[in-house]
Image (spheres, grey):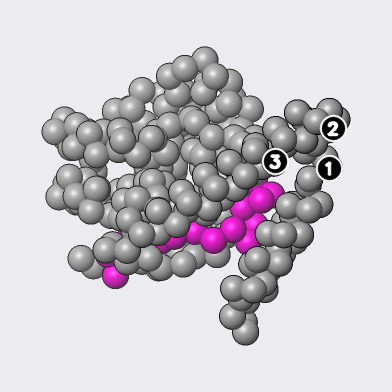
Amino acid sequence: MTSPQRSGRLGIGIIGAGCVGPVLGAALAGAGHAIVGVSAVSEASRERAEVMLPGAPILDIPQLIERSELVLLAVPSDQLAALVSGLAATGAWQPGQLVMHTAAEFGFGVLAPALAAGAIPLAIHPAMSFTGSSIDIARLSGTYFAVTAPGPVLPIGQALVVEMGGEPVVISESDRAAYAEAIETATTFSSAIVEQATGMLTSIGVEGPGRMLAPLIRSSVENALQRTAGPDDVFLPVE
């Protein structure tokens, strides 16, 4: 595969208007790229797209792909493979088109049907919990993104992450499953602990248990991260 030379802005189409797609789209738009459209099915996703990507047209998926230089696939991971292969079967993917997904557990292998059609595969996952609101755009700054791509085009994925304000970390194709497990462990464990602790305080009549526990939880997380830090690691305070 030859690494393409790209400069200037890209026309970006977003498939999936859940919590992640519109936020990354807004960050890329802020970096100077053009949002050509977004695919949104539910009323909630349409409203989110309108708020996060004002003026971006709601398009059907074939039309969106036809118009886009970069297609951002921000769909549930269990739908990704079928979507990519289904679109390949209809001849939707275009040679030279960037196709980027955001699923933690997959590398670029899941995009093989698009690659076979001449598209350029990128797997980019932000290690962040999303709300789907403008709050997330500020939180992207300094967030680490797992980047997996064929060697010649890896710099493209890294550059896109930097443009979104993030820090790219290269994760090999074979290590994506372990990476996804680590992300899931951190997310699930944190949520479960907070819910359990606030529930206990609520049961004994403490009002606003979340406010009470917030300083404790933040300092505990920061201390735990510091204990695992290497000599060059710098941690920002947990918000």
Q: Amino acid at mark 2?
A: Val
Judge from the rendering whether residue 237 lies leftward or rightward of residue 158; answer left or right.
right
Q: CA distance from mark 1 to mark 3?
A: 11 Å
- For the residues labelled 1 and 2, say whether their Cβ atoms are less than 8 Å apart: yes
Tag 3's secondary structure?
helix
Specify whether residue 84 is in view: no
Numbered circles on residues, count = 3
Q: Residue at x 15, y 50 (%)?
A: 116
Specify whether residue 36 is in view: yes
Judge from the rendering whether residue 217 lies leftward or rightward of residue 178; answer left or right.
right
How many residues crowd around disc 2 within 10 Å: few (fewer than 14), some, or many (20 or more)?
few
Q: Is residue 140 magenta?
A: yes
How many residues crowd around disc 3 within 10 Å: few (fewer than 14), some, or many (20 or more)?
few
Q: Quadrant of residue 130?
A: top right
Q: Position of residue 76 (x, y in %)?
A: 38, 35
**Nearer the observer, disc 1 or disc 2?**
2
How many residues crowd around disc 1 within 10 Å: few (fewer than 14), some, or many (20 or more)?
few
Q: Position of residue 151 (x, y in %)?
A: 29, 70
The dot on residue 212 is 1
Q: Position of residue 88 (x, y in %)?
A: 18, 37
Q: Amino acid at mark 1?
A: Met
Q: Which residue is mark 3?
A: 197
Closer-to-camera residue (33/125): 125
Q: Amino acid at mark 3?
A: Ala
- For the residues labelled 1 and 3, say whether their Cβ atoms are less than 8 Å apart: no
Q: Is residue 208 above or below residue 168?
A: above
Q: Quadrant of residue 237?
A: bottom right
Tag 2's secondary structure?
loop
Residues rendered magenta in the picture: 137-151
